[in-house]
Amino acid sequence: MTKLKFMARVSAAALMVSMVGGIAVAQQQLSQALRTATQSTASGAAAQARIDSIDDSTNSVVGDYRAALQEKDTVALNVEQQRIFLRSQQNEIESITSQITRVDEVQDQLLPMMLRMIGTLETFIESDVPFQMGERLDRIQKLKDLMQDPAQSPSERYRQIINAYQIEVSYGNQTTSYSEDLVIDGIARKVEFLRVGRVSLVYTDTDGSLNIWSKANSAWQPLPSSYALDVSSATRIALEQKTPEVFPAALPGASKAN
């Protein structure tokens, strides 16, 4: 083998060794790069996971914040409604307090007023046509007793007084017939009365004679017998024994042509 050939082979061998070494280094660098890339990918995934977790946490915090804002608005609305309610209640309390004060003032004036009303009604009855006087004066006495009863409220007292007034008013629109004792010449006799409102009050005596009350004279005076048929017809109507119809009412001092 010549020296030149030997040198060529040595060079080729060296080149091969160099190439093999380069490949090994390249493989090593590639492996390192792959490991680095793998680590970077893992780190990136971990970072992304942390980002996703942070994003979820952020979304949760934002959601909680929004819910808190909505709850705050709801609470504020409820608070305002409660304030309005409390103001209304306060106004109601002030109104009731004012009314109670006025009630006390009214009650101080109410008792004398009711007593005057009873006295006025009693005077009216005593000066009125004298029909059913026992019943009417007994009603007045009950009102007086009512005023002395501490268990009775002012409203009940006032109601009873107004009721008595209403009864007296109703008498003016009634035609009634009733039996009642009447003292005549010092003797009590049961006679038949016919009352036409407050216009006419006639009684038929036990002997059939007719008498009429004269308010002008505050006394009974005889009524002509010519009114007997009219009085009898009106009495039957008052007792609902006859169909209502227009009838002439006897008046004090009146006379009737035959």
Image (cartoon, helix red, strand yellow):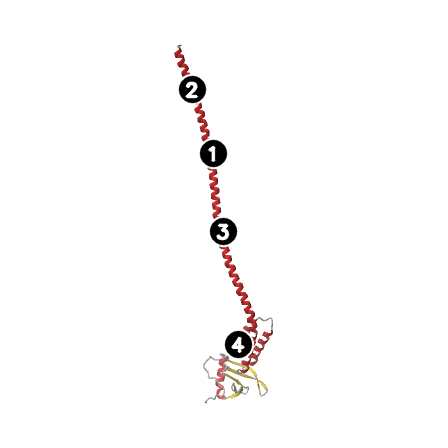
Query: At 40% across and 11% down in the image, what residue appears?
Result: 3
Amino acid tagged 2: Ser
Amino acid tagged 4: Tyr
- Residue furthest top as drawn: 1
Say left or right for 25 vs 96. Answer: left
Q: Name the residue under label 2.
A: 18
Q: Nearer the viewer, mark 4 or mark 2?
A: 2
Amino acid tagged 1: Ser
Gap between marks 2 and 1 measured at Cα:
36 Å
Mark 1 surroundings: few (<14), some (14-19) or many (≥20) residues within 10 A:
few
Tell me the SS state at disc 2.
Answer: helix
Q: Where is residue 70 in the image (x, y as percent from the top left)?
A: 48, 50
Tag on residue 43?
Answer: 1
Specify whether residue 157 is in view: no
Q: Nearer the viewer, mark 3 or mark 4?
A: 3
Q: Earlier in the sequence, mark 1 or mark 3?
A: 1
Closest to the observer, 2 or 180:
2
Q: How many marks?
A: 4
Tag on residue 114?
Answer: none
Whether tag 1 and tag 3 are in contact, CB under 8 A, the answer is no
